[in-house]
Amino acid sequence: MTAPKATTPFRHFLDISDLTPAALRAILDDARNRKQARQGWAKAAVDADAPLHGRMLAMIFAKPSTRTRVSFEVGMHQLGGQAIILNSNDMQLNRGETIGDTAQVLSRFVDAIMIRTDDHADVLELAEKADIPVINGLTDDSHPCQIVADIQTFEEHRGDIKGARVAWVGDGNNVCNSFVHAAGLLDFTLSVATPDQLKLSDKVQNWAQENFVTLEQTDDPYAAVENADLVVADTWVSMGDKDAASRHNLLKPYQVDSKLMAAANKDALFMHCLPAHRGEEVTADVIDGPQSVVFDEAENRLHAQKSILVWCANEIDKMADKS
Ligand code: CP
Ligand code: NVA
C-alpha cells in the first residue's frame, strides 16, 4: 500500500519569476511583521503563532553556505519546527541515487525541502517529484531567497522600491538574475553594468523583455550608478566558477569604490549578499562605510525566509482569511 499523497495544499518557492506581485508582497509584509513582532524578544523564542509547529525542514547542500544554512535553521526553530542539514556528498545522491527517488523518500519523512545546488534543472526535478514544498536556496541560475531579503532591506531604509533605480555592478550572475525577476514584479528600474563576456544570459534578457522589465544594460559602471538609489555588488567568482583569473581581469574596472558610490545618488545604499572580498568587488571603505546595509541584509535572510516557509505551507493565506 502506498502512503496517501499530501492533502494539504502547498507551494514551491523556486524563482521570483514564478510569483505574482501580490504573493511577493504578502511574503514581504509577513517578513516585516515577524521582524517587528520579535523586537525585544529573547533570540531563541518561538513566534507567538508558531505556524510550523512540529514541522521538519530538510536542507540539502551541494555547495557551502553560512547565511542560508543558519538562517533557515534558526527560522524553522522560531516558527516552531526543526531543520535537518544534509550535505549532498554524504547522501546516496552522491552514489547515483536519483533526484526523483530522493524527493519521494524525503517526502515521507519531512514537511519541506530546501536545496542549494549547481544545476537549476535538478531543483525543478526535485520539486516535480516531491509531495512537499521545495525551496531554491541558490542554483547557478538564481538566488530568490536572497532577493526577498534585499527588497525587505531596501524598503526598511527607503520605503517602497517601486520606481527606485537599482544598479548592479559586476558579474551578470545568479543573484543578478533574481534581481531582474524582482524588478519585473515590483516595478523598479534595474541598471546592470557587466563586461560583455559576463552579461546576463539570453534566457533572463528574454524574460525581462517579455515581462516589460525596465532593464538597462551597459559595460560602464558609472552609467549604471547614475541616479541610483541602491548599488549592489557580488563576488567576482561564484561557487563553481572555474575561470577565476580571467574573471578578475575582466571585472577589475567594476570594483565598487568610494568614487563609484559618489557617482550614485547622495543617499544611495550599498548591498552585497555576502560573502564579500574586500579589495576585489568592493573596497573596505564602502562595505564598512555609512551607506552599507550589508548586515541588515544578512539579518533579513532570517525574516524573509521564515515568511517564504510560511507561504509555502499556505499559512499566510490562512492567517489572512481569519482577519
Ligand atoms: N548570501 C548567501 O547566500 O550566503 P551563504 O552562501 O553564506 O548562504
Ligand atoms: N553569486 C554567489 C552568491 C553567493 C551567495 C555564488 O553563487 O557563489
Image (tube, grey):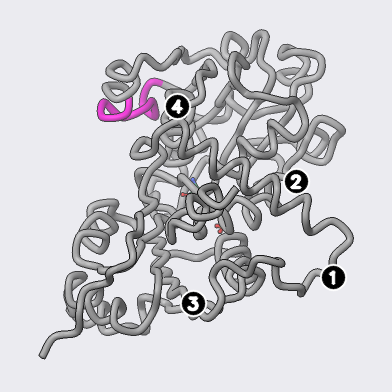
Q: Amino acid at mark 2?
A: Asp
Q: Position of residue 212 (x, y in %)?
A: 36, 14
Residue extending furthest front? 322
Q: Earlier in the sequence, mark 4 or mark 1?
A: 1
The residue mark sitting in front, 2 or 3, is 3
Q: Earlier in the sequence, mark 3 or mark 1?
A: 1
Cα separation between marks 3 and 1: 22 Å
Say which mark, if any, is on residue 296.
Answer: 2
Q: Earlier in the sequence, mark 2 or mark 4?
A: 4
Instruction: Specify few, some or many for label 3: CA neighbours under 10 Å numbering under 14, 14-19, or 20 or more.
Output: some
Q: Amino acid at mark 4?
A: Leu
Q: Earlier in the sequence, mark 2 or mark 1?
A: 1
Position of residue 50 in the picture relative to residue 158 (left or right): left
Cα separation between marks 2 and 1: 18 Å
Cβ of mark 3 under 8 A from ligand 1: no
Q: Which residues are magenta?
A: 196-204
Does the segment drawn in magenta span residue 177? no
Say which mark, if any, is on residue 185.
Answer: 4
Q: Earlier in the sequence, mark 3 or mark 4?
A: 3
